[in-house]
Image: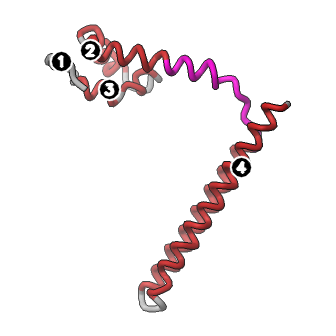
Amino acid sequence: MSCGDPHETDCSEVLDHLYEYLDREMPDSDCEKFKEHFDECSPCLEKYGLEQEVKKLVKRCCGQDEVPSDLRSKVMGRIELIREAEAAGSAQSGAEFQGEGAGAVPEAGHDQAASRDRSSAQTESSVESAQGRKRFA
C-alpha cells in the first residue's frame, strides 16, 4: 500500500513494521520517523488507528484469561520431544541415505510427521481442556 506521495520513510516499510511500533519494540529514532510519517500520510495513519483499536479490543476481550500454571511446561516438553525426534530422525536418515536402505527414508519422515501430529493434537487437547475448565469453573 502506498498513498503515492513521496515520504522519507516509505509506506510499505511503515506498514511492515506497524506492530513493532504499536508494541514499542523499535528504537526511538525509528519511532520518531514513523510518527513523522503518520503526520504526513493519512492512509497509513488510518491503518495505524485501525490496528491500534484491534489491539485494544483483543487486550480487553482476551487479556484477562488465566493460563493454567502447568501449560507452559507441557508445551515446552512437547517441543523438546519433537526436537529430539527430529534430531534422531535426521541422524537415522543420514545413515540410511549412505546406503543402509535409502528406501526407508520416507518411512522415517512419515514417522516424524505422525509424531508431530500426535504431539500437536495432544497440546491442542490440553489447551482446549484447560479453556473448558476455565469456562465452567
Q: Helix, strand, or loop for circle 3?
A: helix
Residue under numbered circle 3: 15
In the rendered structure, the answer to whether residue 33 lies left or right of residue 58 reads left
Mark toward the viewer: 2 or 3: 3
Please tell me which residue lies in front, 41 or 82. Answer: 41
The location of residue 97, given as percent across then percent down, is 42, 84
Q: In whole angstroms, how far apart are the C-alphas of marks 4 and 1?
A: 49 Å
Say which label, 3 or 4, has the lower sequence index.
Answer: 3
Circle 2: residue type: His
Q: In whole angstroms, how far apart are the C-alphas of marks 2 and 4?
A: 45 Å
The location of residue 29, given as percent across then percent down, is 31, 19
Asked if marks 4 and 1 touch (Cβ < 8 Å), the reply is no
Task: Name the quarter where the C terminus is drawn.
Answer: top right
Say which label, 2 or 4, has the lower sequence index.
Answer: 2
In the rendered structure, the answer to whether residue 101 lies left or right of residue 34 reads right
Relative to 52, say whether 121 is above or below.
Answer: below
Asked if marks 1 and 2 touch (Cβ < 8 Å), the reply is yes
Q: Which numbered disc covers residue 125? A: 4
Mark toward the viewer: 3 or 4: 4
Circle 3: residue type: Leu
In magenta, the rendered stretch is: 54-70
Tell me the residue at 48%/91% (across/down): 100
Circle 4: residue type: Ser
Residue under numbered circle 2: 37
Farthest residue to the right: give it: 137
Circle 1: residue type: His
Query: Badge 2 local density, few (<14 within 10 Å), some, or many (20+)?
Result: some
Asked if marks 2 and 3 touch (Cβ < 8 Å), the reply is no
Residue under numbered circle 1: 7
Total residue callouts = 4
